[in-house]
C-alpha cells in the first residue's frame, strides 16, 4: 500500500484526521528544512560538517524528533544559503 493510499484510508477516521491536522505545522516545518537542504544540494552529512554537528543530529531534526534552538535553526538555514524568520499568525480556529 502506498503512503498516499494509507493516509486516505486513515483519514476516514475523524480522530486520526484531527490529530494529523494538529501536527500540520510541524510537518510543514520539517518539509521546509529538507527542501532547503535539497535545494542547496547538500546531504545530511555535508550539512552536519558545515554546522559542526553529527549527521545523526541532522537526521533527528529533519525527522521531527528534536527540539532545536533558534541558533541551531539559524545555522542550518545559513549553511543551506537561507535566512529564517519567525512569523506569528493569529489562531482564529480556537475562538468561541
Image (tube, rainbow, N blue to C red):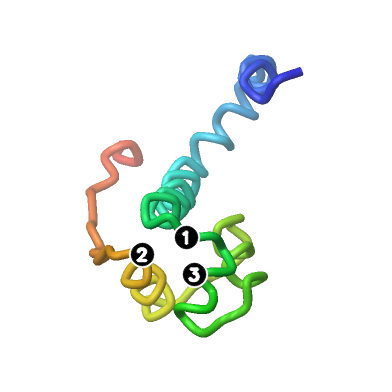
Q: Which residue is identified by label 2? A: 80
In the foreground, 43 or 2 = 43
Q: Which residue is mark 3?
A: 47
The numbered mark, 1 or 3, whose residue comes first in the sequence reads: 1
Left or right? Give the position of 38 relative to 92: right
Give the mark nearest the N terminus, 2 or 3.
3
Image quarter hosting the C terminus: top left
Q: Nearer the viewer, residue 55 or 67?
A: 55
Work out whether residue 93 or residue 40 is closer to the camera in this orientation and state it.
40
Residue in the picture at 49% in, 69% down = 47
Report the disc number at residue 42.
1
Q: Residue at x 45, y 78 (%)?
A: 50
Q: Place residue 64 in its image quadrant.
A: bottom right
Rendered location of residue 9, percent (x, y): 68, 15
**Decide: marks 1, 2 in contact (CB < 8 A)?**
yes
Query: Between marks 1 and 3, how big is the CA–CA gap?
Result: 6 Å
Residue 85 x/y as whole percent? 23, 64
Q: Is residue 8 left or right of residue 43?
A: right
> Do tag 2 and tag 3 residues touch (Cβ < 8 Å)?
yes
| Above or below, 70 relative to 83 | below
The image quarter in which residue 77 lies: bottom left
Label 2 sits on a secondary structure element that is: loop
C-alpha gap between disc 1 and disc 2: 8 Å
Residue beneath the point at 25% across and 63% down: 86
Residue 73 higher or lower than 42, as above or below? below
In the rendered image, residue 60, in percent from the top left (x then y), is placed at: 63, 64
Separation of marks 2 and 3 at Cα, in angstroms: 8 Å
Secondary structure category for the residue under label 1: loop
x%, y% of residue 28?
42, 45
Amino acid at each position: 500500500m502506498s503512503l498516499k493510499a494509507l493516509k486516505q484510508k486513515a483519514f476516514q477516521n475523524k480522530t486520526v484526521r484531527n490529530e494529523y491536522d494538529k501536527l500540520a505545522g510541524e510537518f510543514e516545518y520539517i518539509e521546509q528544512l529538507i527542501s532547503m537542504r535539497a535545494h542547496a544540494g547538500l546531504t545530511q552529512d555535508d550539512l552536519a560538517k558545515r554546522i559542526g554537528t553529527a549527521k545523526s543530529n541532522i537526521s533527528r531534526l529533519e525527522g521531527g524528533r528534536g527540539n532545536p534552538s533558534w541558533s541551531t535553526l539559524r545555522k542550518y538555514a545559513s549553511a543551506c544559503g537561507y535566512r529564517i524568520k519567525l512569523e506569528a499568525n493569529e489562531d482564529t480556529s480556537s475562538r468561541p
